[in-house]
Image (cartoon, rainbow, N blue to C red):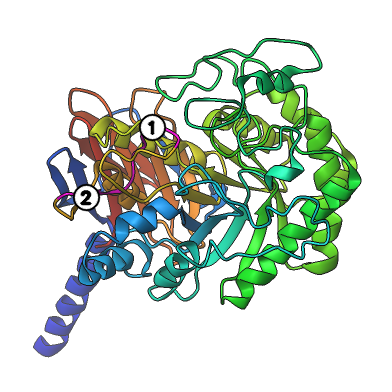
């Protein structure tokens, strides 16, 4: 009898211990100069504050997350190359390995040069080469392909998608890679009239300013001219080029499974870019790119984007074409496009949505920039994006491009000392990507606009609850969440990033 009693008490203790463990969260917090600190938090029977969110097992998921991504740029490869092989391996493991810090499983590749290439190039600069006899990816073999392969060493399941910044220069009406002239390119200023040529408007010198905030409608004025030549020969050749690019990369062991026709069609840039009208966007995607992909690469999805404009009526004009709607699987939003994401997703709930580029900042590499990135992840996941793509994840010095603007990165290399640091944005990213992986359901969202306390609640594929919360205020905040029939009361330090994981 005594043995039975001891056994009963032992079993009861084990059950109680398991119950308490299920009600315990590991709280990981980071603030400036004090990152990745851990403590334990227990669920409570009552809230300390009015709960910001109420999440139950019956709560419908906002989206099911798929992957975090990063962009493979030449200047990133150059920055990585400043370090020793052991340091490179540490960084690549931390960024790409499934058991690393960031767990990046998706790559974005530019077809031709982007603004973080070493210089301008395209895959075919032979004018009039409609048969693409001179198409090649020789430049990509110098940096981009070795870069992707280095990442594949740590994540063999890495998949990629592609978008161009600019067609070959001979396919454009101005015969050059930028949209607008600047001291950083050789385009004659007199060619700028093409942008608004149909209305005879003057270009605004602040239209594409590279520093400061861009408030209001962006762009202030929409291009009236397609910079891509709209002759059918050019449009079909360009569509064929996408397929040749996919083929060429697959020969290198790199699988591309999705394309977008243009990066930021609404940035009228001094670096590689291309302005498109709504009519040109519909025409190229509907009549050329979609059918060519369907014929030659039916396994490759066509997404529409990347949309970096908040002119909702203009985007709706593009999406109103029923034939185009039937061609696409999803959309990519970045920069000002984030403002119209919720409404566009409401109108088209069956498509997939991604953040196609995290914003790059202005070369400050500081905690404020990290808070902005933290809020972006909260916004995009909370509004239904199932992929989030970081831009430059490693840059040297002040992050300056060949076209004269500075950007932030997750990792910063000092080219003089050949040392590197994980920036505040690295920890902002890690607070999400280390815990929210493939098949995680996003089940709760509280925007930063309400009290400077962005909160996201997720359920992993294993059924564990994850809470990611920020406090961008100068004072500490207590946040309460109702999870099931109990409450999680969290103490958030000033200007901190926080992740709480169940049962750890």
Q: Position of residue 71 (x, y in %)?
A: 47, 53
| Along the viewing direction, whichever of 106 and 361 lies nearer the viewer | 361
Q: Residue shown at 62%/65% (left/top)?
A: 256
Q: In which quadrant will I find the C terminus?
A: bottom left
- 10 Å crowding of disc 1: few (<14), some (14-19), many (20+): some
Location of mark 2 (residue): 415
Q: Is 112 inside the magenta-drawn segment? A: no
269 w.r.t. 2: above or below: above
| Along the viewing direction, whichever of 187 and 458 lies nearer the viewer | 187
Q: Position of residue 378 (x, y in %)?
A: 43, 39
Badge 1 marks a residue whose secondary structure is: loop
Which of label 1 and label 2 is nearer to you? 2
Location of mark 1 (residue): 52
Q: Is 412 inside the magenta-drawn segment? A: yes
Q: Position of residue 464 (x, y in %)?
A: 38, 61
> Relative to residue 330, is residue 43 drawn left or right?
left
**Which portion, as a residue range, is magenta?**
403-416
Rounded to the nearest whole Å, what is the CA distance between mark 1 and mark 2?
45 Å
Magenta stretch: dominant SS? loop
**What count of labels does the image hold?**
2
Q: Position of residue 494 (x, y in %)?
A: 19, 30
| Along the viewing direction, whichever of 106 and 360 lies nearer the viewer | 360
């Amino acid at each position: 009898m005594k043995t039975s009693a001891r056994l009963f008490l032992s079993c009861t203790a084990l059950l109680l211990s398991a119950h308490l463990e299920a009600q315990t969260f590991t709280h990981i917090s980071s603030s400036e100069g004090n990152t990745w600190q851990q403590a334990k938090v227990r669920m409570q029977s009552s809230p300390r504050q009015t709960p910001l969110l109420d999440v139950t097992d019956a709560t419908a998921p906002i989206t099911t997350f798929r992957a975090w991504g990063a962009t493979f740029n030449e200047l990133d490869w150059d920055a990585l190359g400043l370090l020793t092989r052991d340091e490179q391996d540490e960084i690549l493991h931390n960024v790409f390995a499934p058991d690393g810090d960031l767990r990046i499983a998706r790559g974005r590749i530019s077809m031709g040069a982007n603004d973080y290439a070493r210089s301008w190039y395209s895959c075919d600069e032979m004018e009039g080469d409609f048969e693409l006899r001179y198409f090649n990816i020789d430049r990509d073999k110098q940096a981009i392909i070795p870069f992707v392969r280095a990442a594949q060493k740590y994540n063999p399941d890495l998949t990629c998608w592609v978008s161009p910044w600019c067609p070959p220069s001979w396919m454009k009406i101005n015969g050059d890679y930028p949209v607008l002239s600047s001291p950083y390119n050789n385009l004659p200023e007199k060619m700028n009239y093409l942008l608004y040529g149909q209305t005879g408007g003057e270009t605004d010198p602040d239209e594409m300013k590279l520093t400061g905030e861009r408030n209001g409608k962006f762009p202030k004025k929409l291009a009236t001219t397609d910079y891509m030549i709209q002759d059918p020969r050019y449009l079909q050749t360009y569509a064929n080029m996408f397929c040749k690019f996919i083929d060429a990369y697959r020969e290198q062991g790199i699988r591309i499974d999705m394309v977008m026709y243009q990066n930021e069609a609404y940035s009228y840039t001094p670096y590689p870019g291309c302005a498109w009208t709504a009519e040109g966007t519909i025409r190229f995607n509907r009549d050329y790119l979609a059918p060519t992909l369907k014929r030659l690469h039916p396994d490759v999805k066509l997404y529409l984007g990347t949309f970096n404009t908040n002119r909702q009526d203009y985007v709706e004009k593009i999406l109103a074409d029923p034939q185009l709607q039937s061609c696409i699987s999803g959309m990519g939003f970045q920069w000002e496009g984030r403002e119209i994401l919720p409404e566009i997703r409401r109108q088209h709930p069956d498509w997939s949505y991604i953040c196609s580029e995290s914003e790059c900042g202005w070369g400050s590499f500081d905690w404020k920039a990290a808070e902005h990135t933290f809020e972006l992840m909260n916004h995009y996941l909370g509004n239904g994006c199932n992929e989030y793509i970081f831009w430059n994840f490693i840059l040297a010095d002040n992050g300056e491009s060949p076209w004269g603007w500075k950007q932030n990165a997750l990792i910063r290399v000092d080219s003089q000392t050949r040392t590197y640091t994980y920036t505040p944005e690295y920890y902002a990213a890690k607070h999400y990507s280390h815990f929210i992986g493939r098949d995680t359901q996003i089940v709760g969202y509280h925007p930063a606009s309400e009290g400077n306390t962005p909160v996201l609640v997720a359920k992993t594929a294993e059924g564990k609850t994850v809470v990611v919360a920020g406090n961008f205020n100068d004072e500490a905040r207590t946040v309460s969440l109702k999870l099931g029939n109990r409450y999680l009361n969290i103490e958030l330090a000033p200007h901190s990033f926080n992740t709480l994981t169940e049962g750890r």
